[in-house]
Image (spheres, rainbow, N blue to C red):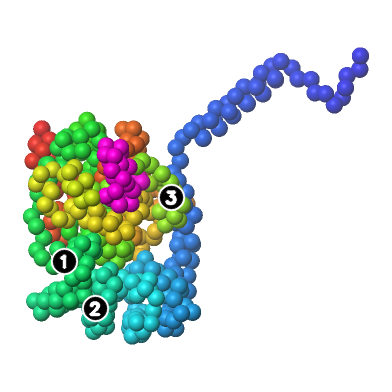
């Protein structure tokens, strides 16, 4: 029988050699795909960051603010205000443009009015006092009135200004005694109450049977804070070497406004942890996020994971879970009243924002947000891969401990102007102090 010249006949030895090589290749491919690889974010490459910065400043900001705001360009002006906050961009040109915009304040739509007050508060703390004082006297909307009052109260902190603001609150809004933003602002005009015992929050009896994350900040949110975790069994999670497990967070927004105001800092208080999810926001990036919900954002039944049948919110629901000494501490209700005022989508996430925007700031290399808890993440601008991530450390913690439902508490400790670290916590908690001494 003739052999078909198109059919290759190999010796058994050669066949085994080929099969062995194929097996080795499969093993190499399997190892390659099983080895964890750092996430990639194209926008963190140096050329992309340079292009984004130039476009943001030249096109989104400067090209827009050359013209005074009017009906035809209000959306572009809102984008310019957002961009100035993101990049912390200040210039003489921008200041003059904002002054012209404030001169037209009464003719603008409500959202642009809010955006102007937001960027002024965040970037020009004393430059627009006459304009904002005029707005304070004319403004009838509670939120924008409070934003103007916060600006003026900070820029001209004295008895006369305080009395002027109090009198206007009474004159304009006495018919709104239960308004959440006005209520929190009235309280802010007074001295802040003394911090209750932190150990009551760390106790296994607080939200018993659920894991709780605690983020401790300074009252000055320019400084990062530290987050620790109490597990469902009541114990504090530890790292290797028996130190407390921890990650760093920034709770500052671009504007630095208080947490009860739209786009303000991360509100103090209690959140419901609803698990891990993925964000499509390019500024948050590819690292998974922790889904947090505020009171009023979801029903009490969902917020407390089915431990109450209530579907409508009442302050008593929130108060009932707090330790006794914390029930009269108004700052811990900020998340409650912020949620009632309409704030939402406060999550714990990473970041792809270029930290160079914030060189020289107290929070560098952290990047502010619109009010979320932002973990420190760093990226290689040559490869676009992640080089450091406390967000991933947080996600790993939830997965290792199988945390799908729980709670998160945000607390401001004191007025010190420095980051909160693990070394600070024993000063506020005897239980942590004892643990570290063991």
| Local secondary structure at mark 3 | loop
Q: Which residue bears the numbered disc 1?
A: 186
**Residue 147: in magenta span:** no
- Tell me which residue sits at (9%, 49%) in the image: 196
Sequence-first tag of 1 and 2: 2
CB within 8 Å, label 2 to label 3: no
Q: Is residue 151 left or right of residue 78?
A: left
Q: Is residue 385 above or below residue 169?
A: above
Looking at the picture, tell me which residue is in the foreground, 129 or 283: 129
What is the CA distance from the residue labelled 2 to the residue labelled 3? 38 Å
Looking at the picture, tell me which residue is in the foreground, 178 or 347: 178
Q: Is residue 88 visible?
A: yes
Tell me where the magenta segment starts and ends, as one range: 290-313
Image-quadrant location for residue 363: bottom left
Q: Which residue bears the numbered disc 3?
A: 279
What is the CA distance from the residue labelled 1 to the residue labelled 2? 15 Å
Q: Which residue bears the numbered disc 2?
A: 136
Looking at the picture, tell me which residue is in the foreground, 161 or 246: 161
Question: Residue 422, image x and y in percent?
Answer: 18, 45
């Amino acid at each position: 029988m003739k052999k078909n010249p198109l059919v290759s006949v190999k010796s058994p030895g050669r066949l085994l050699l080929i099969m062995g090589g194929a097996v080795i290749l499969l093993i190499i491919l399997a190892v390659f795909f099983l080895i964890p690889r750092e996430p990639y974010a194209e926008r963190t490459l140096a050329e992309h960051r340079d292009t984004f910065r130039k476009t943001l400043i030249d096109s989104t900001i400067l090209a827009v603010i050359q013209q005074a705001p009017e009906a035809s360009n209000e959306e572009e002006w809102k984008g310019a205000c957002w961009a100035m906050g993101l990049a912390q961009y200040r210039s003489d040109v921008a200041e003059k443009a904002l002054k012209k915009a404030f001169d037209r304040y009464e003719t603008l739509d409500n959202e642009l009015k809010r955006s102007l007050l937001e960027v002024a508060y965040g970037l020009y703390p004393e430059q627009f006092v006459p304009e904002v004082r005029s707005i304070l006297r004319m403004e009838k909307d509670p939120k924008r009135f409070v934003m103007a009052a916060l600006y003026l109260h900070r820029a001209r902190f004295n008895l006369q200004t305080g009395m002027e603001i109090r009198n206007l609150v009474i004159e304009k809004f006495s018919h709104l005694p239960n308004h959440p933003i006005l209520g929190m602002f009235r309280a802010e005009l007074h001295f802040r109450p003394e911090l209750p015992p932190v150990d009551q929050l760390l106790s296994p009896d607080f939200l018993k049977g659920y894991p709780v994350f605690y983020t401790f900040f300074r009252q000055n949110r320019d400084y990062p804070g530290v987050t620790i975790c109490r597990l469902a069994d009541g114990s504090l999670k530890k790292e290797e070497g028996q130190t407390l497990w921890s990650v760093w967070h920034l709770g500052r927004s671009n504007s630095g406004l208080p947490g009860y105001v739209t786009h303000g800092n991360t509100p103090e208080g209690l959140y419901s942890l609803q698990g891990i999810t993925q964000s499509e926001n390019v500024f948050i990036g590819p690292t998974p996020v922790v889904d947090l919900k505020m009171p009023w954002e979801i029903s009490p039944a969902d917020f407390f994971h089915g431990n109450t049948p209530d579907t409508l919110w009442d302050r008593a629901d929130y108060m009932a879970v707090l330790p006794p000494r914390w029930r009269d501490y108004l700052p811990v209700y900020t998340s409650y009243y912020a949620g009632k005022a309409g704030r939402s989508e406060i999550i714990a996430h990473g970041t792809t924002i270029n930290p160079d925007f914030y060189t020289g700031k107290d929070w560098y290399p952290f990047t502010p947000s619109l009010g979320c808890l932002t973990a420190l993440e760093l990226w290689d601008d040559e490869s676009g891969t992640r080089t450091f991530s406390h967000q991933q450390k947080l996600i790993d913690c939830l997965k290792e401990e199988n945390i799908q439902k729980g709670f998160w508490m945000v607390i401001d400790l004191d007025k010190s102007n420095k980051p909160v670290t693990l070394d600070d916590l024993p000063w506020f908690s005897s239980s942590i102090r004892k643990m570290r001494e063991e």
